[in-house]
Amino acid sequence: MKPEANPKMTILSSPVGLRSIINSLVAFSIIVQMAAEHHEQLRVTEAPVPLTAELPDARKEECNWSTGRKDVMYQHWRWQPYGCDLPRFNATRLLEKLRNKRLVFVGDSLNRNQWVSLVCMVEASIPDNRLKMRVFNGSLISFKAFEYNATVDFYWSPLLVESNSDDPIVHRVEYRIIRADRIEKHANAWRDADIIIFNSYVWWRKHKADMRMKVMYGSFENGDARLEEVEMVDGFEIALKKLTEWLSENIDKNKTRIFFAGSSPTHSWASNWGGVDRNKCLNETEPIYKVGYKEADYSMMEKAMSYFGTLEQKGIRVDILNITELSDYRKDGHPTVFRKQFAPLTKEQMASPASYADCTHWCLPGVPDVWNEFLYGYLMYK
């Protein structure tokens, strides 16, 4: 029996498991408590054909962050408002909206995950005989649709301000250092953008209980360099302060639209949904159905919102892409071991696949496509 919904509930619906998609059209529903800013109720439904289906074969591999994953149930879930319609993504309409404009994702590899998703969703609508191009230039990756003079970029800036992790290739460092008063190098790459989507959470999370970072004030060139060790979350606030100061002083509020994406949840502790922790998200093929499930950390998102609130007081609007809670249910959406490895696996890793399972990034097509459907709704209708 389908449960009765109320204004703060979310209904999830899908065919009963991937094994039954062909043989059964019976749907099941469960109720999940929801407290989301811009959607009262949500429903997960069986998805249409993945948006990358019309891409050339050479692009499909690039647009699918998982390699060798056989189950495809994770591609068949979509979120839409319960009681109203989430606008169906229309790549041609979006490109028309972006005509003579530049959209830039600024942040870490999760923002790149969303950039790849959007480029694949858009590129599928552009015939092969029409001019389009991808350009890689250090920290900046650009997709250009020449017919529309539209550009969709990704800029690598994982800690927002300048840091010792700014190299887009070699950025895994033992001790992270940010420069409290330096953002100009990054800002020069997106100061002329018409739409900016910032994201920066995962790089501020602790990987171990005693993890801290360093903040550099001044410069070695001027002889006044000073390093201060701080908690990771304090470093996050320092970066937010510098970012909002720069935006306040430099952004053209009549031209540039600003978004800040909510934190993308990881699924590394299987006990949160009744599993065994050592397995992480390995072999998970369905979403979490636990009523009221909410394990993502919202504290950093709340800090970001408080800083962006100061911009709103100055007439600079910042929209929050509230992706966190809907993504929290999607333990099934990560590449796990089905991802290109950039270094040979050790014997220990091969003996324990969960040890190298990626439960942070997302398979494509998949969850980031939904994030972009939200972004599309904002750009087209709000």
Image (spheres, rainbow, N blue to C red):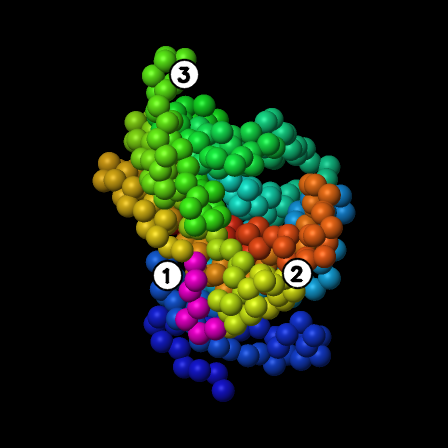
Distance (Cα) linking label 2 and label 1:
27 Å
Tell me which residue sits at (57%, 46%) in the image: 113
Q: Specify whether residue 211 is in view.
A: yes
Residue that carries the numbered disc 3 in the rendered image: 220
Tell me which residue sits at (41%, 81%) in the image: 4
Q: Which residues are magenta?
A: 290-296
Could you say whether the residue bearing mark 3 is in a helix, strand or loop? loop
Q: Quadrant of residue 341?
A: top right
The amino acid marked with disc number 2 is: Val
The answer to whether 114 appears left or right of 33 in the picture is right
**Mark 1 closeness class: few <14, some 14–19, many ≥20 residues within 10 Å:** some
Closer to the eye: label 3 or 2: 3
Disc marking residue 49: 2
What percent of the width, then of the height, locates residue 282? 63, 62
Looking at the image, which is closer to me, 28 or 220? 220
Dot 2 or dot 1: first in sequence order is: 1
The answer to whether 312 appears left or right of 156 in the picture is left
Q: In the figure, 325 relative to 218: above or below?
A: below
What percent of the width, then of the height, locates residue 178? 42, 31
Distance (Cα) linking label 3 and label 2:
55 Å
Residue that carries the numbered disc 1 in the rendered image: 36
Farthest-out residue, right: 57
Distance (Cα) linking label 3 and label 1:
46 Å
The amino acid marked with disc number 3 is: Phe
Q: In the figure, 54 relative to 270: above or below?
A: above
Q: Are marks 3 and 1 in contact (CB under 8 Å)?
A: no
Q: Is 124 part of what is drawn in magenta?
A: no
